[in-house]
Image (cartoon, helix red, strand yellow):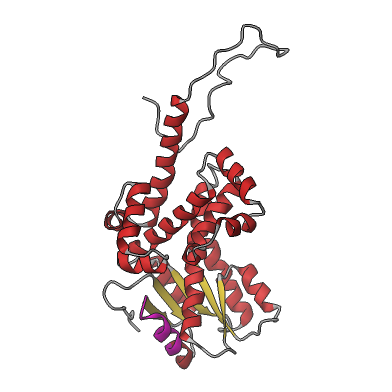
Amino acid sequence: MGPRRPAKGLSLAHLAILQPDARAEARLADALSPGHTVSVVRGWAELRRFVARMGPDGCLVDADSPSREAALIEIRRLRRRYPSLALVAYADVHESDPDLIRLGAAGVDGVLLARRPPWASGIRRSVEGALAGALARSLERALRPRYPAPATSAVAWAAEHAVDTPSVARLAAAVGHTPRSLATLLRDAGLPSPARILLWGRLLQAAAFVGRDRATVEDAALRLGYSTATALSRAMKRETGYTPAEVARAGGFPCVRASLFRRHAARSARAHRATPVPEAPLVNSLPHPLVGNAGAPPHDPLAPPHP
């Protein structure tokens, strides 16, 4: 089956569906195709080839085909090879079934319960959550070499939950901090305030939306709680230097990720250079003299080089 393409300007992702039951396949494709490009594959080997060749944003797979154990092996294989791929499992389980834990451990981002009524809105929510989770994982991996783990977790959480327009209190609680201690943690890591991190999360999701098959700025703004497309455009331009249209042409999410952190690092470096340095006292009370360049700020790999 060829891909089902949505109306022009509305697509948010390219999804692959592996579902041998024709009726279930039709329900899933019908629920997702209004907002996504949907391709149907007929087996795990075909799915592996499809992902390698087409690079879809996510996959919705039958976790009972040809058996639960075989499907778990295939899911783990996909997760290891494609850590940023959104994976949703369609499984014949109930809410308290231990196999839900096994599916989570295998790497799925969401589970559709075959025993529940197949409401289209629930299918879409599960897939959208999986796509947001995949983006957050990608972001955290990119930031991990440069920032401490609690800070990267906060940024990733903000991006994953951007469509919910979360509060600073929710962000802090999600990473085990109070708002005040989170602000200190982010400042010490060289990152902006929690409120601004939440703004960055919305812009990163907006970049993902406009970068996936060119979703409209209006659609991205609506999904992220902006009053108008103009409001989103202004925030994007102020924080990244790009308009949403320029972001879409430059590749979407990776472009905004790079711009946000590099621009902030550059501003922080300028602010540091502009801060007056107090004169050293005539007598040093420390038991050993300070040597070398101990008073210089640590090197930030995202900051531009000094002239």
Is residue 251 left or right of 144 when viewed as pictured?
left
The verdict on residue 11 being magenta is: no
Residue name at image x 49 percent, y 56 percent: 138
Tell me the quarter of the image containing the N terminus: bottom left
Q: Is residue 214 visible?
A: no
Is residue 234 left or right of 179 when viewed as pictured?
left
Residue name at image x 45 percent, y 88 percent: 27
Relative image position of residue 95 (x, y in whole percent): 66, 82
Relative image position of residue 160 (x, y in whole percent): 51, 62
Furthest toward the right, the residue is 287
Q: Decide which of 303, 174 is in the foreground and name it.
A: 174
Magenta span: predominant SS is helix
Relative image position of residue 53 (x, y in whole percent): 37, 67
Residue name at image x 45 percent, y 54 percent: 199
The verdict on residue 27 being magenta is: yes
Q: Is residue 112 above or below residue 276?
A: below
Q: Which residues are magenta?
A: 26-36
Q: Is residue 64 visible?
A: yes
- Say which quarter of the image contains residue 35: bottom left
Q: Decide which of 84, 146 is in the foreground and name it.
A: 146
- Say which quarter of the image contains residue 30: bottom left
Furthest toward the bottom, the residue is 23
Relative image position of residue 169 (x, y in whole percent): 60, 57
Furthest toward the front, the residue is 227
Q: Decide which of 1, 188 is in the foreground and name it.
A: 188
Tell me the quarter of the image containing the C terminus: top left
